[in-house]
C-alpha cells in the first residue's frame, strides 16, 4: 500500500525558510519520481517541482531560485527546501507519486507566511 506523509509545515515570517519532508512507503523508492504541489484557498492546485529517479529536477517559474527539491533514497524521503518565503506562498503543500494506473497524494502540510 502506497503512503505519502508530509511534514515540516508551519508559520514563518516573510523572508524565512522551511523544509518540507515527504516520507514514502509501499514503493521502490529509488525508482520513483515525485512532485510537489500546493493549493491556496480559492485557487487551483499548482505544480511546483519534480524530481526524477535519477535526481534530475524541474521547477515552476514561480519558485525557481527559491525552492529546491531533493531526495534521500536511504530514508525514502523527498524534501522541498523553501527559502525567501513570501505571503503568496501560503498554501497546503502536498507531494505526489504517480503510476500508470493511479496518482497518490499525501495529506498535505500547511505553510503560512505572515508577519
Image (tube, grey):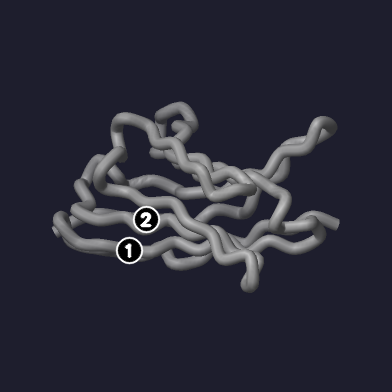
Picture disc at residue 111: 2
Q: Is mark 2 on a helix, strand or loop?
A: strand
Picture disc at residue 104: none
Say whether marks 1 and 2 touch (CB < 8 Å). yes
Quadrant of the frame with the C terminus:
bottom left
Quadrant of the frame with the N terminus:
bottom right
Q: How many marks?
A: 2
Q: Where is residue 91 in the image (x, y as percent from the top left)?
A: 39, 46
Q: What element carries label 1?
A: strand
Which residue is more in the foreground, 35 or 104? 35
Residue 37 visible? The answer is no
Q: Please report the residue visible at 44 percent of the width from the left and 67 percent of the height from the top.
A: 8
Which residue is more in the foreground, 17 or 77? 77
Q: Which of marks 1 and 2 is nearer the N terminus?
A: 1
Relative to 44, 86 lies left or right: left
Say which of marks 1 and 2 sits in front: 1
Amino acid at each position: 500500500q502506497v503512503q505519502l506523509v508530509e511534514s515540516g509545515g508551519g508559520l514563518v515570517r516573510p523572508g524565512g525558510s522551511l523544509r518540507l519532508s515527504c516520507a514514502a512507503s509501499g514503493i521502490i523508492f529509488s525508482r520513483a519520481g515525485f512532485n510537489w504541489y500546493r493549493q491556496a484557498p480559492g485557487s487551483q492546485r499548482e505544480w511546483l517541482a519534480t524530481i526524477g529517479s535519477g535526481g534530475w529536477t524541474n521547477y515552476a517559474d514561480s519558485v525557481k531560485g527559491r525552492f529546491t527539491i531533493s531526495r534521500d533514497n536511504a530514508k525514502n524521503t523527498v524534501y522541498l527546501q523553501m527559502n525567501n518565503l513570501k505571503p503568496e506562498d501560503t498554501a497546503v503543500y502536498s507531494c505526489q507519486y504517480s503510476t500508470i494506473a493511479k496518482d497518490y497524494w499525501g495529506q498535505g502540510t500547511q505553510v503560512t507566511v505572515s508577519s
